[in-house]
Amino acid sequence: MKRRVFLAAAMPVTLAACGAQNIWASDERLRAARYVSPEPPSITLLTVIGIPRGEGGHSGLMFNGSQRVIYDPAGSWQHPQIPERNDVLYGINDNFKNFYIDYHARSTYWVAEDTVPVTREVADLAIRRAEQNGSGNKSFCAVESGKVLSGVPGFEGAPRGFSPLRLRAWFLTLPGVQSKRHEDGDPANNHDVLLRQKDGQVVGYPRR
């Protein structure tokens, strides 16, 4: 499958080198984008892993509490319909969740989705910690993810090092964790966000 660039014309990125920006969306945009998922409350670690060597490329967190957001420290994913405040992305419905995963999964990377069930109170605390943490510096994605998790009940042992793989190895020891593997072109990640291919053709995917 051709590597795609989303219609917002974001700058090309290299996953192994996380970037950082300071962005502050308005309260109005956050209220308008707010998405409440019907799924049980949870904390999810998203890890981008290289193919074929298995190196860690990026770490991000998804929190499903009173709303669903993604904390993408030093990340590069963005879309004009998704408001951001310093690495916290709001309005993450199923369609944009799939888009986020599809953006990172490519011929040279796959995405691990590891989820731990929590109470809504714990998930909301994690959201607040991410909001208070601020944007991450370049290549600090695992550091900032571990820092946010370490202040959440049940996640106090999170490592704060630079390795996404070490963070994932620890996360996989948590009780009740469930894992999914996402690869380039995985039908489970279909979405209907318009994309522009390198040849200029605008395409989209049906929502599942």
Image (cartoon, helix red, strand yellow):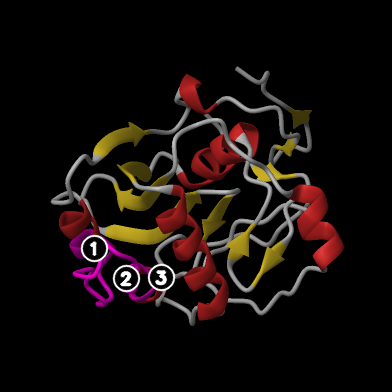
- In the image, what residue type sits under mark 2? Gly
Q: CA distance from mark 3 to mark 1?
A: 10 Å
- Badge 3 is on which residue? 141
Q: Earlier in the sequence, mark 2 or mark 3?
A: 3
- Badge 1 is on which residue? 167
The answer to whether 128 appears left or right of 33 in the picture is left
Picture coordinates of residue 13, whole percent (x, y): 56, 62
Q: How many marks?
A: 3
- Badge 2 is on which residue? 146
Callout 3 crowding tier (Cα within 10 Å): few <14, some 14–19, many ≥20: many
- Are the residues tagged 1 and 2 within 8 Å (C-beta)? yes
Does residue 81 appear anywhere in the picture?
A: no
Q: What's the magenta bit mostly, secondary-structure-wise? A: loop
Numbered range of the magenta stretch? 146-166
Residue sitting nearer the eye, 129 or 182: 129
Does residue 77 appear anywhere in the picture?
A: yes
Q: Quadrant of the C terminus?
A: top right
What SS does tag 2 mark?
Answer: helix
Residue sitting nearer the eye, 129 or 199: 129
- In the image, what residue type sits under mark 3? Cys
Q: Residue at x 48, y 47 (%)?
A: 104
Q: Residue at x 68, y 18 (%)?
A: 206
Q: Residue at x 44, y 42 (%)?
A: 41
